[in-house]
Amino acid sequence: MPKGQLKLMAVVATPVLLGILVSALLAERGLRRNELARTARSLEERASLVRELIGPLPPALERSRALDARVDRAAGAAEARVTLIAPDGRVVSDSDVSFESLDRMANHSDRPEVQEALQGRVGVAARRSATLGSELFYLAIPGSEGGVVRLAVGLPRLEAATAELRREILAAGAVGLTAAIGLASLLSWLALRPFWELRRVAEAIASGRLEYRPRLRARSELKEIADALHHMAEQLQLRLKEVTGEKERLRAVLDAMVEGVLVVDEKNEVLLANRRLRELFDAWGEIDGRTPIEAIRHAEVDAVLREARATDLPVSRAVAVGRVAPRTIRVHAVRFPSGSGPRHGSVAVFHDITEIARLDQVRRDFVANASHELRTPLAAIRGFTETLLSRSDLGEADRRSYLEIIERHARRLGNLVGDLLELSRIESRKPGREPSSLDVAAIAEGLIHDSRTRFAEKELRVSLERRGDARVWAERQAVEQILLNLLDNAVKYTEPRGRIEIGIETGEESVRISVGDTGIGIPRRDLERIFERFYRVDKARSRALGGTGLGLSIVKHLVQSLGGEITVESALGVGTTFTFTLPRARPAPERAAPRSA
């Protein structure tokens, strides 16, 4: 409810509420006064009767059980609490207090009703009894021997009547207050309705709902203002439609761009950012009106924008973005508009050159690694060939030794070129043979049988454990090459009399194959890089064993090309286990039957 209406209702309802409160206080005070007067008349009559029933009192008003019994009987007849008080304020007898407890009662000489009675008048008072702990009405009259006879009764009737009066006053007050609030609400609504309507029109225009029109009577004094607002809304609606169309076209173009776009004003606050920019910097909250460092949280981009704001020349720089998935972004920033006039801001365009940078780095690494790997065998072949050609005095043994060295390096060079061609074929995804249902356990047994001479040379124990159906859906040559490379790797790096264990386990969707050994192991820092091309843990030993540095890279690419994954676990001095998965072959009815030739 509007504040103005609340204030008007409060002005009307406050006098009503005050009147109800004053009336309630006056009525309650009058009721209490009348009820106390009636109670006083009744008690005065009963006090005289009690004085007669008690009869003559002992000299000096000494306490006695006989006197206490007469006081109790008189209290029963009078239906009130009876207290007999000596002239010095000492309580001689009390109908509500036992005879033994009279000594503990306080002196009553300071009670106002007792003081009145001691002076020969009738004394009355209403207060809370300290002895009984309840509200009582007291009446005291002079007694014999200079004492005082006092009666006390509770005020249940007064309290009940007062409570009933309060309820009636509250009910009447609630009805009156409700009526007053309702009337005030109606009057305020009628008086303020035109202003509320104008306010709604203004709020609608401010929020962009320009189709809203004021609903006012033609004879209203505010009709001219409403008509003016109506005309203004129509003009704004036309202008807004034009601006919205242009903005939507611009937004559609920007969101369709593969480059990110960021526009900031002269205060270095964001004016516009397209969807691609938000994707590049993972900024999906509200960024308009914030500074670039707050919006995208990248210090280098903020530095580029600041540099562009300080010069008339375009600024270009490559920056790294992201931690989980790093990207390389080329930023081009320039101030606008061009010319000698005042500048209104800067615009920056972001090109994702991650793949270009990666390919360029791969190319540089490949050239460097390939050159390094090819240089050694070529240098050896050239050197020993020159020696053979230049020296005619070599003995047959030396000549044969040199030729064997040349042959060994030529073979290594051939293996290296072959691996490079194979890796190139796999990476280019050139189609090989069609996949088929293969028993990977049978393939592994065949490779073990073919390599038994190598195993025997180092006294290696080779075992194969198979659990479940070991049939996979893959290309046979690729599976053989994967297992052969892993077995060759295990043989090279396992000490004599070691073990090589091959495990095959069938899952719901794939077959898990592991090749483990008890070899020298791989340091933890090298585990993430062993699948890189030309990466060697022990370069000298790898070359001495004839490795090209491409075997595990070929294995990884072959596994991925077959739709599987490969992992490695290793510990120095304990051994290494390579584990890869291949898609499981489905039963024959689930696959389409091959067409006949």
Image (spheres, grey):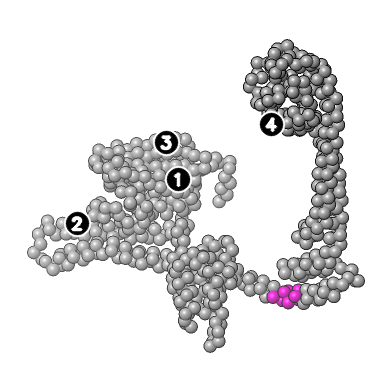
Q: Is residue 344 placed above or below 168 in the rendered structure? A: below
Give the mark nearest the N terminus, 4 or 3. 4
Q: How crowded is mark 4: few (under 14 residues within 10 Å), some or many (20 or more)?
A: few
Residue in the picture at 42% in, 39% down: 504
Q: Which mark, residue 404?
A: 2
For the residues marked 3 and 1, what is the alpha-carbon distance in whole angstroms? Answer: 14 Å
Q: In the rendered structure, which amino acid carries the disc numbered 1?
A: Thr
Q: Are marks 4 and 3 in contact (CB under 8 Å)?
A: no
- What secondary structure characterizes most of the magenta part? helix
Asked if residue 577 is among those painted magenta in the image, a careful observer would answer: no
> Residue 160: where, in percent of width, then height?
82, 32
Residue type, numbered disc 2: Glu
Q: What element carries label 2?
A: helix
Mark 4 or 1, closer to the camera:
4
Highlighted range, magenta: 236-243
Relative image position of residue 562 (x, y in whole percent): 47, 51
Please name which of the two marks, 2 or 4, marks the residue nearer to the observer.
4
Residue beneath disc 4: 110
The reply to whether discs 3 and 1 touch (Cβ–Cβ < 8 Å) is no
With respect to residue 261, does 159 lie above or below? above
Q: Give the mark nearest the N terminus, 4 or 1.
A: 4
Q: How far apart are marks 4 and 3 (CA)?
A: 110 Å
Tell me if residue 285 comes above or below residue 153 in the rendering: below
Q: In this view, does 452 lie to the left or right of 358?
A: left
Distance between mark 1 and mark 2 Cα atoms = 41 Å
Would you say residue 273 is visible in this rendering?
no
Which numbered marker is on residue 435?
Answer: none
Q: Position of residue 482 (x, y in %)?
A: 39, 49
| 242 in magenta | yes
